[in-house]
Image (tube, rainbow, N blue to C red):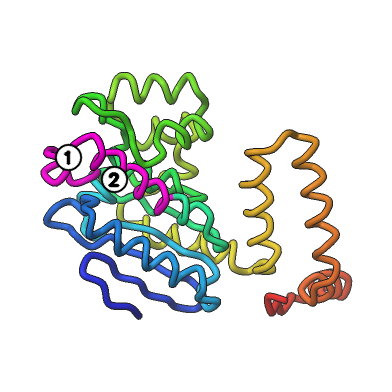
Amino acid sequence: MSNYNYLTLTEENGIGVLTIARPKMLNALSTEVMEELDLVLEQIENDFNIQVLIVTGAGEKAFVAGADIAEMKDKNVFDGRDFSAFGNSVFTKLADLRQPTIAAINGFALGGGCELALACDIRLGSTNTKLGQPEVGLGIIPGFGGTQRLSRIVGIGVAKELIFTGKNINAQEGLRIGLLNQVVPNEELEMSARKMAESIQKNAPFAVELSKEVINAGAEMTLADGLRFEAEVFGSLFSTSDQKEGMEAFVNKRKPDFKRG
């Protein structure tokens, strides 16, 4: 579907699959990979054939093992700040995609790899998944959103433990603390991600997209403001053809045929 040096993007029946494809380097996030991610996310945002996006890594060993340390080690203060700011802008673009996103985490998701997964809406792990934010062991901190998104997902106390210790955790521990939504056998990860995507895709696309927007926005609002925003968006959907179709189908006991409108 698209030609990149370190990424592949395919689409089939409304489900997009974005693969970080640098397996010899365990899919580490170099500047070139991040620049390609920035470009491909723009493409995905504007591709209305893609209703749900799966994000994964090439090979069996790693989702993304982290940032490219060999590239990072000689950066100065200004380089480091700019690298973090750019990474944050790319991962925020992923988090803000109108489409729901599913991270299919095969193998290592450490440092920037864990942060990439955190920027997705749903995270599926396999039995060989390893998660962690080990940056303090390198003399730095998580720089692509880990200090912010991790605590919003697992809570401040657990996030501090993971970041302060720099320890890796397995998939079952990730599931227990709420970092992962599901854990499946390695050989079932791709199929499980597709099943999850299909279970989302069967619903009204515009309603799903707006659900994501309201949830994300509400996390930055007071409860009162969030409830007001919810009511506004709820009401706006009564002007759509999908609302008419969904409710007519329910009343008439038939399957809806949504058109994203």
Q: Calculate the distance from the C-alpha at mark 1 to the C-alpha at mark 2.
A: 9 Å
Quarter residue 150 falls in: top left
Q: Is residue 159 magenta?
A: no
| Boundaries of the magenta span | 66-91
Question: Where is residue 86 shown, x and y percent of the image?
Answer: 35, 50
Residue at 33% in and 78% down: 2
Question: Where is residue 16 shown, x and y percent of the image?
Answer: 44, 70
Quarter residue 250 falls in: bottom right
Mark 1 and mark 2 lie on one chain; the one further toward the N terminus is 1
Query: Label 2 sits on what residue type?
Result: Phe
Residue at 82% in and 45% down: 228
Query: Label 1 sits on what residue type?
Result: Lys
Q: Is residue 89 magenta?
A: yes
Q: Give the residue pinned by disc 2.
A: 83
Numbered disc total: 2
Residue 97 against residue 151 in the figure, above or below: below
Q: Give the residue pinned by disc 1.
A: 75
Question: Where is residue 246 shown, x and y percent of the image?
Answer: 79, 71
